Image: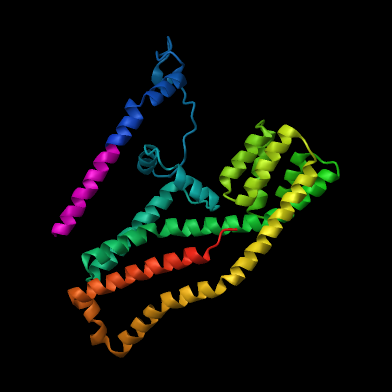
Amino acid sequence: MIFAISIGIFLAIILFVEGGYYCYHQYLNPQNKNLKRRLRGGSGKSQIGKNADETPGMLRQRKMSDLPWLQDLLGSMTNLGGLENLLQQANSQMSLGIFFLLSMVLAAVSLLIGGFGDYPLMVGLGMGVVGGLLPWMWFKRQRKKRFKKFEQQLPEALDLMARALRAGHAFSVGMKMIGDEFQDPIGPEFNRTVEEISFGIDVPEAMQNLNKRVISTDLKFFVTALVVQRETGGNLAEIIEAISRLIRQRFELLGRVRALSAEGRMSGIILFALPILVASALWFLNEPYMRLLIDDELGRMMAMGSCLLMVVGAYVMKNMCDIKV
């Protein structure tokens, strides 16, 4: 009970500090005051003969949820850009409101499972946290898979663009051909860039927007080379072919590195899975012997310490085998 009260006090302090920061950022920050004054008309005074409440808004409101109260709550938060980018980069049609509701439901279900399962307080709270983070972890995984597929499609797309440039087509036509010929993710992303260019955005700015939407080292090479070529000149088709060849050589080197580090990665997987398999086998063979790790206080401390050391060891071995190319 004392531990739960301490957690409640800690959360109350965190919410109080966050609320104070939000009030300052929303109402007292001089930059926001100047921005609001400029959006109202520049003088800070209401227009003659018009009510300030009747002035149409100049900013497009984000549609985060179909529920009005949840839309107002999420609209008042200013630090949700990262989650919105995560959902867009994962190519998800889920709104931000549904994402938060799903997270809260999974967290509540996990807490109920921990409560009815007569688990210790820390275990129940840990289950609730893990349940609430499941949607975030899922979309992080989907985004990583999408970016990996984008990098695999990029060399062929650059070859197609180089051939289009050699045939006499414009750069925007080559981008449009990539958008029409390739599937998700590279096709829709390049189509969106072509639409931005058609609406009047400069090519370097549109390519930088593409670079922000897709996190890829190979794409950064392409965007940087394109921006430099537009400023200094040169044969764009040859530059794109060289970048495509460089990306393929990088993939080849990455494959060699993964083959050489396969033994270390397999050793890490075996060392991490072996204690879990042995503990499961002992639990089925001699349950009273293993229950000491749950019922006894010293046993729980030993189990938690072992799990912590296993996680640290897996993190260290993963970083040792994850060689950047």
**How was this image coloured?**
rainbow
> At 43% from the left edge and 23% from the top edge, which residue is drawn?
35
Q: Position of residue 159 (x, y in %)?
A: 77, 52
> Which quarter of the rendered picture does the C terminus lie within?
bottom right
Q: Is residue 68 above or below residue 57?
A: below
> At 52% from the left edge and 53% from the top edge, which residue is drawn?
92
Prevailing secondary structure of the magenta residues: helix
Q: Position of residue 69 (x, y in %)?
A: 35, 41
Residue 18 sits inside the magenta stretch: yes
> At 62% from the left edge and 58% from the top edge, which residue is drawn?
149
Q: Classify residue 236 as left or right of residue 281.
A: right
| Location of residue 305 (image quadrant) | bottom left
| Location of residue 286 (image quadrant) | bottom left
Q: Classify residue 114 as left or right of residue 256.
A: left
Residue 258 sits inside the magenta stretch: no
Q: Is residue 313 above or below residue 289?
A: above
| Residue farthest top in this picture | 48
> Which quarter of the rendered picture does the N terminus lie within?
bottom left
> At 16% from the left edge and 54% from the top edge, which residue is drawn?
5
Q: Classify residue 272 as left or right of residue 2.
A: right
Q: Position of residue 50 (x, y in %)?
A: 42, 14
* Residue 106 seen anywhere in this rendered image of the structure: no
| Residue farthest right in this picture | 167
Asked whether 109 or 17 is in front, the reply is 17
Q: Classify residue 232 as left or right of residue 207.
A: right
What is the magenta range? 1-19
Q: Is residue 229 above or below residue 156?
A: above
* Residue 105 seen anywhere in this rendered image of the structure: yes
| Residue farthest left in this picture | 2
